[in-house]
Amino acid sequence: QFAQPAGLIYDAFNEATCVIPRFPIPSGWPCYVGHDFGGANPAALFTAQDPATGYFYHFHEYKPGAGRSPSAGGRTEGRSTAEHVEEFKRITAGHTVLQRVGGSHQEDEIRQGYTAHGWPIREPKLKAVEAQIDRVYALHKLNKVFVFRDLAHYLDEKLRYSWKLDDGYKPTNEIEDKASFHLMDAERY
């Protein structure tokens, strides 16, 4: 009997230690936002850093849902880029957002759209998915990332995010069902 699924990418994530009750994020803590773009499934992960310890706290997830609303001209659940930005600003009200990062190199036009509405998002410095995953993995290994218990979508993705297995049940370097893990992409950005 296995405690974790075979091939689990973030097997170093200590759920018992790092999933915590919600508390008010102090206004003096800097915030960071990771974005995963998509007309049907945009996602964002909001993270604060305790300047005294360097620990990171995922305090809000944004995953409005799949599907396009035909009556909204193809916008996600009737939301335009401007409406997404307004929600991001509401979530971070009273906090200083130091960085907004997201998307791949090919998604510069989407970043420009958010910038035009007052929410500049930069391209990730690390381009390789494996390098981005390694960086998050290292933080999990050190128990430096804490997650509020009510971030249900994030926790669901975290505990299912796995490498595809080969015929011998050995992990490959390909992510299983990669297109459905939007918050994991937002986190690694």
Image: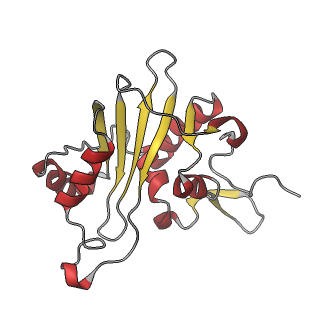
Residue drawn at x 36%, y 33% as measured from the top left: 31
Query: Which residue ends up furthest to the top in the rendered image?
Result: 52
Query: Is 127 on the left or on the right of 53, as rendered?
Result: left
Looking at the picture, how far across and down is residue 69, in whole percent? 28, 80
- Seen in the picture, residue 19 relative to 106 is either above or below; the reply is above
Query: Is 125 on the left or on the right of 160, as rendered?
Result: left
Task: Please tell me which residue lies in front, 131 or 8.
Answer: 8
Query: Which residue ends up furthest to the front in the rendered image?
Result: 24
Query: Which residue ends up furthest to the left in the rendered image?
Result: 116
The quarter of the picture where the N terminus appears is bottom right
Task: Please tell me which residue lies in front, 29 or 43.
Answer: 29
Instruction: Tally the marks.
Output: 0
Residue drawn at x 41%, y 60% as measured from the top left: 63
- Seen in the picture, residue 26 relative to 102 is either above or below; the reply is above
The quarter of the picture where the C terminus appears is top left
Q: Quadrant of residue 30?
A: top left
Looking at the picture, how far across and down is residue 142, in whole percent? 63, 27
Residue drawn at x 48%, y 40% as measured from the top left: 58
Tell me which colouring the rendered structure shows: secondary structure
Looking at the picture, how far across and down is residue 125, in whole percent? 33, 37
Residue drawn at x 15%, y 56% as measured from the top left: 113
